[in-house]
Every structure is written in structure tokens, then in C-alpha cells.
Amino acid sequence: MKGSMVLGKIKGIQIELHVSWLIIFGLITFTMATSFFPENFPEMEGTMGWILGAIMAIFMLMSILLHELSHSIVSIQQGIEVKRITLFIFGGIAQMEREPDDPDKELKIALAGPLMSLLLFVIFSIALQVLSMLQVYEPWLVIFIYVRNINLILVLFNMVPAFPLDGGRVLRALLWKFKGNLREATRITSGMGNIFGFLLIFFGVYLVFLGNFINGIWFVFIGWFIKQLSESSYQNTLMTDMFTKIKVDTFMSKNVIAVEGHISVEALVENYFYKFKFTSFPVLSDGKVIGMVTVDSIKALQREEWDRTAIRNVVIHLKDDLMVQPQENVTQAIKKIFQNGVGRVLVMEGGELQGIVSRTDILNYIRIHSQLE
Ligand SMILES: [Zn+2]
């Protein structure tokens, strides 16, 4: 996520902290130090309040991190890579490389987070008992009570059966398993996600009218966030579902126009870019594809260099994210198209160019498909 700083790596997963989390950190620490502790423990020193408030905020962050780590580790065990976990204002997001391809995997991954929060709730409850028997300084108990409660809230909130919350994923996996239809299961659970989002927004507005301004706004934001998330996850599932059924070779454009690496940039612009109106072309050398040339790759050149520069000198060399195999799913091609910065991939088999898939092809297909359905 943009605006995040990297905290470190755990089991190969990059842990990032988004700047928006600092607001929460500040808010918790500030509230505890300036109102909660002074009101309840007037004898406490001011700095102690800030320290305890910060410790509490860090414990809460750790609780969220452990919840996400639990999802991630189970996900990796199920064969789905997790590149990073981002902690931000509304909690945490574990970025999975793809959606689970069967309901059992989804069920295990979805349950792993809430189970961890439940475990933390139990641990903090026991620790609280022990600490109060030992008669430790009371403000410490307060921290443990709050962190215990946060973990309970994490369990309850996440288990609401509204996709894409964990409970929604659990319900989706069960519907998917017993009805055998991922689209239908996603439609139902993301519909519930939408309703839950609306309920939170209404509740927030209600709180604002009651004069509880901060909490009210907070609920409105979370509700809005969940609504957005459930809609975009639904679209995403539909798209993935649609494209996993199609192989690259039935989707690609054949008869690709390629250019020879020895021609000049001048010739490329005149005889290819303006003529065919494509923004990039595969480049050949001795009949073999060596890479691609795009409008972007010649932008850096001065106009007067065009006629003395051969395009093999500005070529983007062939690498994994520029190529797909004809037998792969179109989803593989889409992933690369949106990541490689060229907006298209070459379909290659045994070193031979078979076809091309572009961003425009994908978007047009979606447009046609959505009009016919
Ligand atoms: Zn979760």
C-alpha cells in the first residue's frame, strides 16, 4: 500500500505499517494519557500515562498483526503465497497472491484469524487473573482488560457473516462447498456485506445524532469501507471466475505484427505506431523475439536521434512478466498485464511467438460479456 513503511519480515512475509495507523496510535495514547488515566488514577505521573497508553496501543497492534499472520501462515500452508501484511487504520490486510481455488482452503484460511484472536482473548484473560492475584499496579490491569476486550471484538466483528469479513468468507466457503457454485455463494455473502456496511453507516449516523460524534463518524467510515470492499471483491471474484475458464490460446490475438530490431526508431514511428495504431510491438532479431518496444521506451529519446537509433537499443528485453504460455489461464495473462507496465503480454511456446493479449482485449471482452449477460 502507498504511504506504508516496512517494519520487517516474518516467515518471508513483509510487514508494513501504513501512516493512517499512526492516527490510531496517537488517538489511543492521547486519550489514555490525557483523560482516562488522570481521571481514574489522579496520583499517577503524567509521563507514566503516556507510556502506558503507548504500550496499550502497541499491544493492540500486535493483536491485529497476530490475527493477520495466522491467516497468512495457513494460507501459505495451503499453497497460496502471501507477500505482505499491511496494518492500517481499519485493522490489517494480508495480501494473498490469489483467491483460494477450493472451499476447504478458504474455510481454513478464514477461520485461522478469528481463532488466533480467540486464543489471545483467552491468554489475556488468564494473564489478567494472574496479575490481579499478584496485585500488580492497577493501571497495568486496565491495559490487559482493554487488550483482552479488543481481541474479543476482533473475534465477534470478524465473524459477522458479511463478505469479505472472515465470517463472510466462512459462510461463502460453506455455501460454495454445499451448492458447488462460487459465483452464487459470493453474490449472497457480498450482498450481506453490503447490508452490514449500510447498517454500520446508519448506526454511525444515529450515534452522531445522539451527540456521540467521534464514535459515530468512526462507524460511518468502517461501514463505508466494508461496503466498498464487498462490492469490489464481488466484481473481482466474477472476473476471476470468468477468466479462469478461458485458456490464453483461445483468447489471444493471432497474426501479430512484429518489427525487426535493426530498423530505426524513425521507421518504427512512421511505419508501425502511426500506421497500425498499437502502442507496442514485439521486436525480432534473426527471426527470434528479443523483447518489446513501446511508445514509452522512445519518449526518452531526442527527436533528432530517431533516425540514427536502431530499435534493438531501446528494446524492453524478454522476461517472465512479458510472456505467457498458450495453455495457461487468461487470469495469468491479466496478472502480468497489470504488473509489467507494458499493458500486454506475448504468448510464447518453445521460443516461438504465437499471439498477444493486451489490456484493451481484456477490457473489451468484459464490456461485451457484461452487455450480453
Ligand atoms: Zn481476519
Image: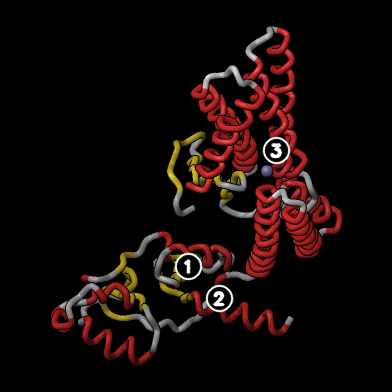
Q: Which residue is mark 1?
A: 337
How far apart are the two marked residues, 2 and 3, measured between alpha carbons? 35 Å
Q: Secondary structure at mark 2?
A: helix
Residue under the point 21% across and 78% down = 262
* Residue matched to label 3: 112
Between disc 1 and disc 3, whose residue precedes? 3
Residue 74 to residue 122: above or below: below
Give the CA distance from mark 1 to mark 3: 32 Å
Label 3 CB less than 8 angstroms from ligand 1 = yes
Q: How far is mark 1 from mark 2, CA to CA? A: 10 Å
Do callouts 1 and 2 mark residues in contact (Cβ within 8 Å)? yes
Residue 65 visible here? no
User: Looking at the image, which is closer to me, 96 or 130?
Assistant: 130
SS class, disc 1: helix
Residue closer to the observer: 40 or 290: 40
Q: Amino acid at mark 1?
A: Ile
Sooner in the amino-acid sequence: mark 1 or mark 2: 1
Mark 1 surroundings within 10 Å by alpha-carbon count, few (fewer than 14), some (14 through 19), many (20 or more)? many
Q: According to the image, label 2 marks what residue? A: 362
Residue 349's spot in the image, x, y percent? 46, 67
The structure residue drawn at horizontal position 76% and vertical position 64%, both measured from the top left corner, is: 183
Type of the residue with mark 3? Ala
Q: Is residue 285 left or right of residue 23?
A: left
Q: Amino acid type of disc 2?
A: Ile
